[in-house]
Amino acid sequence: MDPKPGAPGAEADRGTRLVVNGDPLDWFEGMTVRDVLRAKNYVFKLIIVTVNGALVPRGSYDEAPVPAGADVKVVHLISGG
Amino acid sequence: MSTTTPDYTVRTSYTDDLETMKAAHRVLLEVPFTPSEPERGYNMRSLYVDLTTLTVKEKQVTPQMKDLFVGGRGFGLWYLWNATTPTTRWNDPENEIVIAPGPIAGITQYPGTGKSLVVSISPLTDIPIDCNVGGYYGPLLKFCGFDAIEIQGKADREVVIVVDGPRGVIRIEEAPLEPPDSHVLSEIFTHMYATGPEDYRNVSVVSAGKGSDHSYIGCLNFSWWDPKRKAARLKQAGRGGVGTVFRDKRLKALVVRGPVIKADLNHVADRARIQKVGSVINKEIHDLDAQQCNMRRQGTAHLVEVMDAYDLLPVKNFQYGNHPDTKNIASWVWDKRFTQGIPDGCWYGCTMSCSKGADGHVVKTGPYKGDVVTVDGPEYENAAGLAANCGIFDPDWLLESNFYCDTYGVDTISYGTLCAFVMECWQRGILNAERTGGLDLTWGNAEAQMEMLHQMARGEGFGVIAGKGIRQMKRIFAENGWGDPKLMNDIGMEVKGLEYSQYQSKESLAQQGGYALTNKGPQHDEAWLIFMDMVNKHLPTFEDKAEALHYFPLFRTWFGLNGLCKLPWNDIEPANNAEQPEPAKVPEHVHNYCEIASGVTGIEVTKEKIIEQSEKVYNFQRVFNLRRGYGKREHDWPPYRSVGPVTVEEYESRAERYDKQMREEIGVDPEGRTTEEKIAITRKYREDRYAKLCDAVYKRRGWTTDGVPTVETLKKLGIDLPELVELVKQHGG
């Protein structure tokens, strides 16, 4: 399958960014919360995601869009021990 | 590794000679007692045993003890304080082992409510150690009529202390023939002291093993009967050498036989109140665990690949945080290897059921070679410490080391960390075959790791030196002129004499404090703040970190006062947790704990009271350390390996990260500088920040800049007992 436009390996929209937990991340058209988690290698399951302050339900990461310039917070809870 | 699940009922039996062993027992003391059941969580009495004089007596639990120390770890520390002097050593007769379950322990309506707390003066640290352990011993002891057992003195022969509740008898028996290793001993004594198979589940055995005889890292195994497997399973009071103290007292085992467990042996104040929150969390676990941590299938082993992904898995003595071969020891391996569908709760009613077991392991080495055993675990700490941290990424060898550490009574965490240390010493030429007696401690050499453990159990060779722990090894190696003391101090992962547990803290200043600012030494059960700090960036200032290092250690201390497991607090999360304020605290579960504590004791417990109760005990323990010549700023200083990169290869492996910090935070351009220069600049910056963290934490905790609780703090907490006040005054508090 071809990568989404702007995804790693594609050419477009390299200059547009978003912010994840205070750090910049390249944005691409059609980016979802799942894409953000994948890009950051956030594999932990006990997380809370907000996009521009709005809570994203846990079951909708695959579809939830992330707009250009978004402020994404991925709050990792505590586990183990 | 086999790809098929072994028959979980097949294992080697050790009861063939049971009658011979039993016949060799000689009763040294038999004392009748009146069994009782707790009322609102308390019996208001404890059991004192002196092994030197072979005396047993009951002690009253006073209202003041309840008020100031609650139970569990609090009772243990209070008894230990009164039993010892500032100069009591771990192997002096007056040192005690205290086991106390806490008032909530023993309820069956809420998960994780069967814990015992073990307190003693540690051979590793020379200060009090506390361990939180599952298994049935503590609850059954309570249901016989005692809120704690306090063991002092030393026997002149191998003994077992038996508390038989249904018969109302306490016996000290000479037990000369049984091997001390826990997987054998737990099975033998369960069969020996139960009245029959239906009674096995009412018996619990506490034991150590041969490894505890010859090392300072001995642990205690607390048994619980697994009726499905028809096996005595084990949970460990792991840290600080409590097994070493146990064997030094020539204790072969503690055995308790309690009444048949029923739903309300704690005789709680308001059972409906407990059931109400219990049914809610049990539904959460049923509905949500598979989507969250999968504790019911994988236990804490679910964390292996998570830690690897965040560069937090200790690899090769905490040099690195991930490894391509982590996949070989990751959760999906254990999901297949653990027998599924069996209730694996280490206490009745625990629906989290995370005490996973790997059945059918055929032992490869040592005295049990060829035997078929059930391995209790591996949990995350074992996988990270015994495997990844030593460069061993083989699940079968991990099962082997996990099994032998447990049955020998050796703490898997300390053993994993000290193995990693000696392997790095080998890498850097501090150790060689001549110095280790031929052990080739190359990274990844699982057979050498096992042989060192067997040596420890036999009391032979380099294994005995390793078993003294990292602090003593550093001293011995330096005295022998084998290596640079400064380098060994940097890479030897211990604080206060206790080996680190298995998380990389280099990129989280808060977690550096979470480890090194602990009372007992670097164990993650006080505070695990890495995600909050490093990933979420929720703790940007020193004051934010200090607040977290105030709240979380106190909140988690409370589990140890009450006989609770931490895991149902935040390894399962309510569906609406994300919508709550401060979700990292899991507010609904905090509310649940208030409900069950109030429901058990009849005393209203609020979230503020939780912190207040813990703060008394936490500060008392700090003063206890002070009394023993520790407990000050100098004792809270971490090894640099836990703070930043020690070596050139470490720096260069994460050069982008460190160069970025240098450029953006330190304000120094890394261009054109040698790696050695950059290491020095980074070190100064990070150590300065750690010092500032100490300042902020001490201030938040109400301590002086030297880390001493002030008189005002003791007064505020209501623990201004004259001898405590005098002590802190002597140290500027």
Image: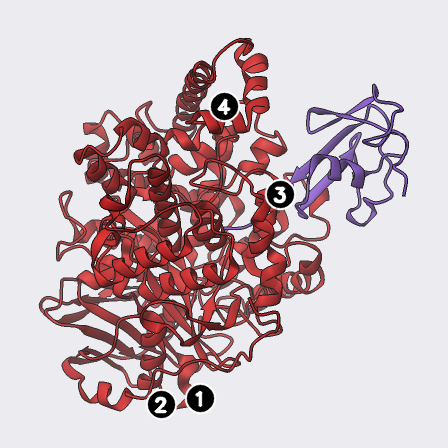
Chain colours: A purple, B red
**What's under tag 4, amino acid-wise?**
Phe
Q: Are marks 3 and 1 in contact (CB under 8 Å)?
A: no
Q: Amino acid at mark 2?
A: Thr
Disc 2: host chain: B
Res B215 quadrant in image: bottom left
Q: Nearer the viewer, residue B415 or A80?
A: B415
Q: Position of residue B61 (x, y in %)?
A: 28, 61
Evaluate whether label 3 is on the same chain as label 4: no
Find residue A30 and report its image quarter.
top right
Check disc 4 and report the residue beneath it: B542
Q: Is residue B655 above or below residue B177?
A: above
Decide: marks 1, 4 in contact (CB < 8 A)? no
Provide residue B518's location: percent of width, then percent of height: 38, 39
Q: Please, which chain is the residue tagged with disc 3 on?
A: A
The crowding category of the residue bearing disc 1, from other C-alpha atoms within 10 Å (few below 14, some 14 to 19, many at least 20), is: few
Alpha carbon of mark 3 to alpha carbon of mark 2: how far? Answer: 46 Å
Residue B242 image point, x, y percent:
28, 56
Label number found at residue B198: 1
Amino acid identity at mark 3? Leu
Residue B502 is situated, as x and y percent measured from the top left of the image, at 46, 45
Question: Pointer 3: residues within 10 angstroms few (<14), some, or many (20+)?
Answer: many
Tally the numbered discs.
4
Under mark 1, the amino acid is Glu
Q: Is residue B461 above or below residue B339?
A: above
Q: Residue at x 38, y 74 (%)?
A: B143
SS assignment at label 1: helix
Q: Horizontal placement of B98 versus B645: left or right?
A: left
